[in-house]
Every structure is written in structure tokens, then in C-alpha cells.
Image (spheres, rainbow, N blue to C red):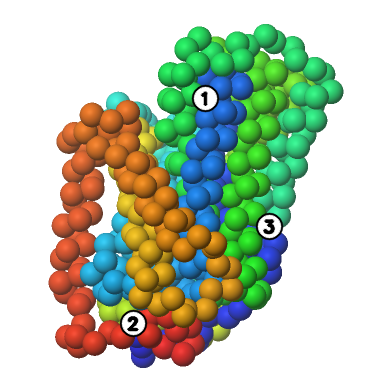
Amino acid sequence: MSRSTTDGSLERVLSRWQLFAIGFGAIVGWGWIIQMGYWIDEAGPYGAMVAFAIGGVLVLLVALIYGELVSAMPFAGGEHVYTHRAFGPVVSFICSWSLLLGYMGVVGFQSIAIGIGFSYLIPGFDVLKLWTFAGQTVYGSWVAVGFVGIIAITYMNYRGVEITAQVQLILATVVGISGIALVTGALTVGPSVSNAAFGGAPVLGITTVAIQVPMLFVGFDVIPQAAEEADMSSRSLALVLLAVVATVGLFYIVSIWAAGQAVPAGALGDSLVPAATAMSAVFSSTVAGKLMTLVGIGALLTSWSAFVIGASRVVFAMADSGLLPESLATVHPEYNTPSRAIVLIGVLSMAAPWFGANFVSSIINADVMFGIVLAWFTVALSFVALRYNEPELERPFKLPGGYAFGIAAMAVTLFFIALYMPGAPSALLWPREWMIVLAWVVLGAVLFGLSRRTTTETTIEEAGQPSSDR
């Protein structure tokens, strides 16, 4: 790989805590704020906790695979680098393009979700009705605040990953403190309601929640995207990634417990912002609920910014290897960021606010989960291939048991993929959601054909070199 258009270079500036904040913020976004009530209503507080424990263990298995690979190849692009080294450009493009589908879905959703947050906080915020799309009214105020968010997040990322990471660290700390406050409050006041521990239908409830859990852990895979900008050892990269997954799992479980102690399951399920409802109940204050909604908006911003980091680094790595236009591999000479890739992500995301929450929810189903779990599968496949083809590759964080972890991760990710097939519990809907996937596949095929380098030798060795040496 080469980067002839690059004037600057990516710098190793991220500390352990900053990288942790990027990963934590990527996962713990707006979703837990608004979906907590559904989980408890379906499975009861303890059933939801069991579902998250089961799903979390399965995701942790995938994260272990990532841990070994990021320690062996701590370079920008993460999954793109692993699959390129294992299988070459075609599989690498499929993996990276799938991942980009998922990341863009999150970025697009956040530009809508911020309007929902402001609508809850500010009475009369829903003004200037534009149209109804997919059953959802689109308001000009939602579009406006979405645009402001897009411009701000894009500009912050453009100016430097260290600035972005510092903001992430502050906001992630606030989110963490809010979770501790919710749990502490629940412990202090004691159980004020008597929810059925496992809901009305325990097995069905736990299963219903468990199949959603992988989506609630999406974001740990952003850490490998920024690996080349992390100022730490390769082994530490793996440990930070695993610490993020474990911490998020604990965060979800204790938050579910606290909410289930404070509010009846049905009331949580009916609430627009269940986490805020729980906080209001725990502290007997509507102000506490409003503050929790503000925290939710902060969590939304951390997730939004983290996925801009992830998406832009995927574009950057693909361009650097000739799978997208080479100009997108440009690094800003002053800010040392993949500036053109970041601007591209910002411009593309400006389409989302015009379509409303329901359509963007379809994108979340099609883009985020289907795209990302497909990428997870190719990463697991690459793990096994590299263990076989390159046993001598230095792996500072090396999993014991040879191929066992890779085969297990392949089975888990295939199960995740199967959840979105026709007839499955989370099957993508025809035609809307499947058409999104098909359109993305066609666009990817066209870009791959146009951008494919004429040289047949894009060496495997170069796929594993840091960007400054490529």
C-alpha cells in the first residue's frame, strides 16, 4: 500500500483512558436510554440481566479474537488490515464495506436521535412539520439540530483525534457517573415496586432480549480503527478493548437492575425515555429525569463521534490500499487526521435527518447489525487463516488453544448473521431493509470495479505495515 496523497501522518497521541472512552462511548449511546424499558417489560429485570450476561459472553468471545489481531497488527483500519493480510483485497473489501454500512447507519441514526432527545427536554420543540416518511413526522427543528450536530462532530474530528478523545473522556465519565448515581439511588431507597423477576414468560422474554444484545455492544470494534493513533503497547490495546466490553456489560446489567427496582415494568415500557423515568422515580424529582436525558444526549454524542472515527478510518484504510479513490487517504498536514474521509462521512450523514426516525430505525436493522456481524465473521475467519498461514506472526496478546477461539467465534457470528435471515426472530424486512442491503452491495461492487488497482501485486506484507511506512 502507498499513500502518495498524504502530507501528514497519523500520530500516536491517544492514552489508555482516551481509547477506553472512545470504545465505551461508542457502545453506550442513546440506545440504552430509550430501550431499557422494553427489556424489563419483556423479560423482567432479572431476566433482562440474564439476557445481557449471555449475550455479553458471546460478544466477549468475538472481542477476544479482536484482541489478538489488534495486538499483532495495531494499524489504522483494523478489520480491513486483518482481512487484507489473510485473504487479499476482495475479502477485505467485503469486510470493510460491510463495516462501513454499519458505522454509517449509527452515524445517521444519531443525527435523528438528537432531535428526539431535545423533543423530550424542550416542550414545543417539534415545529415546522415538513412531511411524513415511513409513518414518522419529520420536523424542521429535528433536521436543524441534526445538522448542527453533524457539523460540530465533523469539525471536532477534523481538527484532531486527541481533541475528540478528550471530549469523549469527559462525556463518558459523566455517563458512568450517572449510571452509578442511578444504582446508588436504587440501593438507598430500596425496591419501591414489585416487578416479576423474569417477566410473564421467562424463556421467551430472555430470548427476545438476548437476540438484541449484540447490537447493544456494537462499537468495541471502533478501537482497532484508531489503533495506529494509540500511544501504548500492542498488548495494552487488546486489554483496553476487552476492558471496554466487560465494563459495558456490567454497566448495562446494574442499570437494568436499578431501573427495575424503581419503576413498574409496564410504565418503563411505555416511557419515551425509560432511563430518565427511572432516575426521576429513584430521586423523586423530575429534574433528575431531565438531567438523565441530558446525560443520554451526552452518550449519544460520544457514540456519534466514536463512529465517525471508526467510519473515517475504514474509508481511509480502503483508500490507502486502492479499494476507494486514493485522495481519501489524505492526512491533514497540520491536524494529522484523515481529513477528506472525515468530511465525506459528514456530508453523507446529512441525508439522514430528512427521513425521520422510523426509516433510520430500518437502517439500523439493515446497516448496523447485519453489516457489522458480517464483518465480525470475516474477522473470525481471518483469525483462523492467519493462525494457519502465519503461525510465526508476533502476537503480544495470544489466545491459548490455537484455532478453538476462532472456530467458536465463527460459530457465534454465523448465529448472529442467521438472526437476520428470513424466518428468524430479527429477520430483515422485505422490501425496505433488504433493498438497503442490496443497494449497498451494488454500490460497493461498482466502486470496487472502478477503484481496483491495475497492479495484481498488493502484497500481504504491506497490509500489515503502519501507515507511516506504507
**Discs 1/3, front:** 1
Q: Which residue is mark 2?
A: 460
Whichever of labels 1 and 2 marks the residue nearer the N terminus, that label is 1
Q: Amino acid at mark 1?
A: Trp
Give the answer, above or below, for where 314 lies relative to 116.
Answer: below
The residue carrying pointer 1 sits among few (fewer than 14), some (14 to 19) or many (20 or more) residues within 10 Å by Cα, namely many
> In screen coordinates, is 115 left or right of 248?
left
Quarter of the picture holding the N terminus = bottom left
Residue 361 in percent (x, y) is at 36, 36
Residue at x 16%, y 74% (from the top left corner): 450
Q: Amino acid at mark 3?
A: Leu
Secondary structure state at the residue bearing disc 1: helix
Pointer 1 with pointer 3, Cβ within 8 A: no
Cα separation between marks 1 and 3: 28 Å
Cα separation between marks 3 and 2: 36 Å
Mark number displayed over residue 29: none
Q: Which residue is mark 1?
A: 39
